[in-house]
Amino acid sequence: MPGLDFFNEARKRFGFLMCEQDLQACQFYLLSGLFYAEALRPIDWWAMLSKASACSAYFWNK
C-alpha cells in the first residue's frame, strides 16, 4: 500500500503526544482517520475520527 511506511513512521513519532489535547493532536487524529478511510479500515477510521472529535471539542472549550 502506498504511503504505509510514511504513515507508520509518523505514528511512531506521535506516540509521545497521544495524551495531549492540542491542535496538533486533533490534526493527527483527523489525518489518520482519512488514511484509514482510504485504506478501507472502517473500525480504525471511526476510532480516529471519534478521538479527533473529542480532542477538538476539548480544545475549543477550554
Image (tube, rainbow, N blue to C red):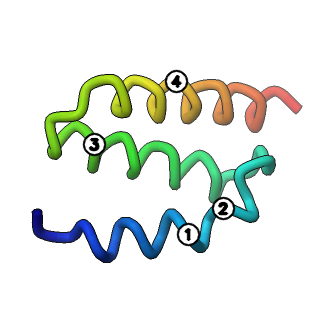
Q: Which residue is mark 4?
A: 50
Which structural element holds mark 4?
helix
Which structural element holds mark 3?
helix
| C-alpha separation, residue under disc 3 versus residue under disc 2 | 17 Å
Say whether residue 44 is left or right of residue 13.
left
Label 4 environment density (alpha carbons within 10 Å; few <14, some 14–19, many ≥20): some
- Residue contact between numbered discs 4 and 3, judged by CB atoms under 8 Å: no
Q: Which residue is mark 3?
A: 36
**Which amino acid, by three-letter code, is at mark 1?**
Lys
Which structural element holds mark 2?
helix
| C-alpha separation, residue under disc 2 versus residue under disc 1 | 5 Å
Q: Residue at x 23, y 33 (%)?
A: 41
Mark nearer the viewer, 4 or 1: 1
Q: Which comes sooner in the sequence, label 3 or label 2?
A: 2
Say whether residue 61 is left or right of residue 32.
right
| C-alpha separation, residue under disc 4 versus residue under disc 2 | 18 Å
Mark nearer the viewer, 1 or 3: 1
Which structural element holds mark 1?
helix
Q: Residue at x 40, y 67 (%)?
A: 8
Q: Where is the C terminus found, in terms of image quarters? A: top right
Q: Residue at x 52, y 52 (%)?
A: 27
**Which amino acid, by three-letter code, is at mark 2?**
Gly
Q: Which residue is mark 2?
A: 15
Is residue 20 or residue 13 the one in the foreground?
Answer: 13
**Which amino acid, by three-letter code, is at mark 4?**
Ser
- Residue contact between numbered discs 1 and 3, judged by CB atoms under 8 Å: no
Q: Which residue is mark 1?
A: 12
Q: Which comes sooner in the sequence, label 1 or label 3?
A: 1
Res. 42 image quadrant: top left
Q: Which comes sooner in the sequence, label 4 or label 2?
A: 2
Q: Which comes sooner in the sequence, label 4 or label 1?
A: 1
